[in-house]
Structures are given as C-alpha cells and as structure tokens.
Image: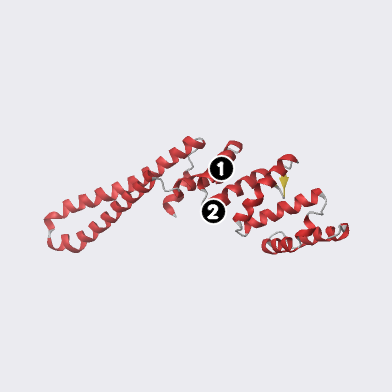
Amino acid sequence: MNFNPSKNKDFYFEYHRIGSKAFRDKVRFYEDNRSYVGQLEYSDRIDIDLDYVLCLFEIGKYHKFLSKADSLIEIVIMNNIFDFNGVNIYNDLLFKKAACLFNTGQYIKSEKVLKSIVKIEPENDLARSLYGKCKRKQGRDWYEGAKALAMVMLISALSIAFMELLIVRPFYNEYIATISSMKIFFLVSGILSLIGNEVYLFYVIGKEIGYKFDLQEFKKRFLK
C-alpha cells in the first residue's frame, strides 16, 4: 500500500473516536486496518500500539497480549514514557503481563515478574495478592495437604454434631460429654489448621518478597 499521510491520520483519529471503554471495537478496528499502523508517525504509532495492547488485556486476549508486551515494555523504557492515560505505563504493563501469565497457568513466570514489581513498588498490594495466588495455584504439598486435613476435621466435627443430635442425646445420654469433647476437638483443630496454613503461606510470601502482613487480605481468605 502507498503511504498516505492523510489516510493514516484519519485512521489515528477514527481509532480514538471509538471510545475509551469500547475495547472490542478498538481491537477489531486496529486489526482490520493493521496496514495503516506501521505508517503512522512514530509517536502516534506508540500511542495506538499501547492502547491496543491494553485493550487486548481488557477483553481477555492474554496470549496475544503476552506476544506483544515485552517489545512494548522495551519501547516504553527506551523512550522514557512514564505516563499513559494517567497511569505509570511501565508498572501497568508489568502487572498486566504478570496477570496474563497467571491467567494462562504460567505461575512461576508470573512470580518472577511480580517480584520485580514489588521491588519497584513495595506497597503494591495487588502484586502481593497475585503472588499469593500463584503460590496457591502451584499446589504445593504442604499447603494442599494441610488444607485437606483441615477440611476432614471440620467435616468430622459436623458429622459428630449430627450424630450427637440424632442418636446420642435421645438414646445414649451417658456419652454426651465424650461426644461433645470430640466435636469441639475436631472443630477447633480444623479451624486452627486452616488459619495456621494461611499464616504459614503469608510467612513464605513475606520471606520471598518482603514482609507485609495484609490483614484485609487475610480476612478475605476466610470470609469469601
């Protein structure tokens, strides 16, 4: 296609007229008119490419986002681009890359990116939270084993409570104290095991990316 500055500029303005939240429409328009992108002025091309890749993330095109993210991160670094649409674009791209890696099952790679983010932004709670999810998703033996044991204890406590209500109290009054003790033992053990499991996970995460006990995140683990 011959270079046409007027047509290319029309493409640039038409893209931005679509609307900031019309992610799918912008992705479709970009991909239908890809030939014009490479002929834009350098700054306009960066602007369009950055917006396009952010739209890919918003509509869940994680693999496609990952295929373009590294080159755009390099461009952002080389051109000293700090702000894009009111956000720190370097940090934003890094976090979205980590989120895409997480959503595509690449948990170890996601962890590495999240560690880099936490070094830059120690108070980034989103990165810390996602790092914890990476740890859980990897199905570590100690975490999954303790969680399974806790669930067995809680189910046992519930079963004993039903047995006490339906059988022991009506027919075997003399065993109420023993059964109640067993019920309390399994209930307390199960709850302590769940809490201890989460506390230990927070310890592991803190050891790897710096200690910061997030009480709200801890509460959400048990209230969700």
Q: Name the residue carrying label 2.
A: 103
Label 2 vs 1, first from the N-terminus: 2
Looking at the image, can residue 112 be seen? Answer: yes
- Label disc, if present, on residue 157 of the rendered structure: none
Is 79 positioned to the left or the right of 101 in the image? right
Viewer-proximal residue among 205 and 186: 205
Give the SS element for disc 1: helix
**Residue 97: horizontal and vertical position, in percent?**
60, 48
Q: CA distance from mark 2 to mark 1?
A: 14 Å
Viewer-proximal residue among 52 and 173: 52
Instruction: Give the residue type that dot 2 points to.
Output: Asn
**Residue 177: horizontal and vertical position, in percent?**
16, 51
- Outermost residue to the front: 1
Q: Residue at x 13, y 54 (%)?
A: 175
Q: Quadrant of residue 119?
A: top right
**Residue 139: horizontal and vertical position, in percent?**
42, 48
Is 215 positioned to the left or the right of 60 in the image? left
Q: Name the residue carrying label 1.
A: 114
Q: Quadrant location of the N terminus?
A: bottom right
Q: Residue at x 57, y 47 (%)?
A: 98
Looking at the image, can residue 88 be seen? Answer: no
Instruction: Give the residue type that dot 1 points to.
Output: Leu
Viewer-proximal residue among 145 and 217: 145
**Residue 215: horizontal and vertical position, in percent?**
47, 43
